[in-house]
Amino acid sequence: MIAAARAIVRRDLLLALRRPGDVGTALLFFVIVASLFPLGIGAEPNLLRAVAPGVIWVAALLSSMLSLSRLFAADHADGTLEQMLLGAAPLGVVVAAKVLAHWLISGLPLVAIAPLIALQYDLPASLYGTLAVSLLLGTPVLSLIGAIGAALTLGLRGGGVLLALLVLPLYVPVLIMGAGGVDMAAAGLSPQGQLQLLAALLVVAAAFAPWAIAAALRISTE
Amino acid sequence: MLEASNLDCLRGGRTLFRGLSFSLQGGELLRIAGANGSGKTSLLKILCGLLTPDAGEVRWQGAPIRQLREDYSRHLVYLGHAPAVKDDLTAAENLTVACTLAGRKASPQDAQTALERYGLPADAVAVRRLSQGQRRRAALARLLLSADAPLWLLDEPFAALDAAAARFTEELIASHVAQGGAAIYTTHQDANIGAAVLRVVELG
């Protein structure tokens, strides 16, 4: 079981390494979206500081959406998904490994680059920690919830749009908690409440989402 | 071993087959024959549990496969229509991942030997550089590492293969059956496998 999970994570990371373009797209998208806002709303430092947490979080949300539609589609097309469904390990475990790999490829780089974006918005350095922690706790939840949508819309025509309609509303709590935590810290309050709620969301999502994804995959591959 | 009873299959509002029943013991070989679109692939998918039949059930050693899930799939090798190899990985990498997923231990050395026996070049090239037939060989090499799986389900195993590879595959299936395993394969040609008990299910 562990061996199968490890093999999937290793395989997906290796595939990402051989196709660096796919990883780069999501990251570049994040950077570009976050950079467009200052151009659109003007270079008023106080305003930028105020909108920064929200903008960075929305950009992270959209960029994590971007790579979701490919999460199972490629495996579905070349038949490897069938082999996962017929594997010796429970499907939930295999799927959890796939989501972990997806997060390592598309979520973790966002966490790493977020302080750079924050610099653009002139966020005080004291907030970088909170921002990074909130993203670190929040982006895996985005991957987990998004994977349920990706599994449900697998093989549908126009699945991409449907996926966004399905998943974005479910991202709202993560967005509120994540951006809210940074806002709290910016106001000089403790962000702990929000971060703990995010951590709780992560625990619940990690425990239940893989089984939901597995069930959705079984339905959509029939 | 494997028992199918009263299987119905409807796809897209069309009845592919109705009331199909058969059973398969170790040492038996079953060929699913029929024209294009007669439901061969659907039947194979039903037998391995990827598809739910509209009526009837499949049983493995007496228990319905719906309940067994991984306990059933651990005993089978399924080679589908798509070769299930990743274009950006080498054939050996594909083979090790596939074996690990199926719960079998395969060292890179084992994988390399299996691929060489199937006549694939030993150098590490990504599968995207291989021809259609070589890709098929890379997928079929899993059979060499799955001798312990009692049930083989093969969808068009001879498609895109040249004569030598097709003969090698036939011999592989024949020896698996001779050793007490069971195999089911689909084909629309009259491919002969010189094995013990050959039975045919004709669809359509």
Image (cartoon, coloured by chain):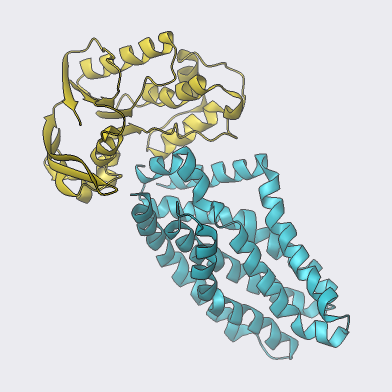
Chain colours: A cyan, B yellow
User: Could you say which is closer to the camera, residue B179 or residue B64?
Assistant: B64
Report the side of A48 relative to A191 (left or right): right
The image quadrant where one finds the C terminus of chain B is top left
Report the side of A163 relative to A66 (left or right): left
Report the side of A42 relative to B30 (left or right): right
Hey, which quadrant is residue B186 in on the image? top left
Residue at 74% x, 86% y is: A186
Q: Position of residue B90 (x, y in %)?
A: 57, 29
Hey, which quadrant is residue A14 in on the image? top right
User: Could you say which is closer to the camera, residue A135 or residue B53?
Assistant: B53
Q: Is residue B77 visible?
A: yes
Rendered view: A80 above or below A183 = above
Rendered view: A182 above or below A218 = below
Residue at 75% x, 82% y is: A51
Residue at 46% x, 45% y is: A76
Report the side of A195 relative to A144 (left or right): right
Rendered view: B39 above or below B91 = below
Q: Position of residue B98 (x, y in %)?
A: 44, 35
The image quadrant where one finds the N terminus of chain B is top left
User: Could you say which is closer to the camera, residue A47 or residue B162?
Assistant: B162
User: Could you say which is closer to the camera, residue B69 or residue B7?
Assistant: B7
Q: Position of residue B180 (x, y in %)?
A: 19, 21
Q: Is residue B110 visible?
A: no
Q: Total label count?
A: 0
Rendered view: A161 above or below B182 = below
Q: Position of residue A222 (x, y in %)?
A: 33, 49
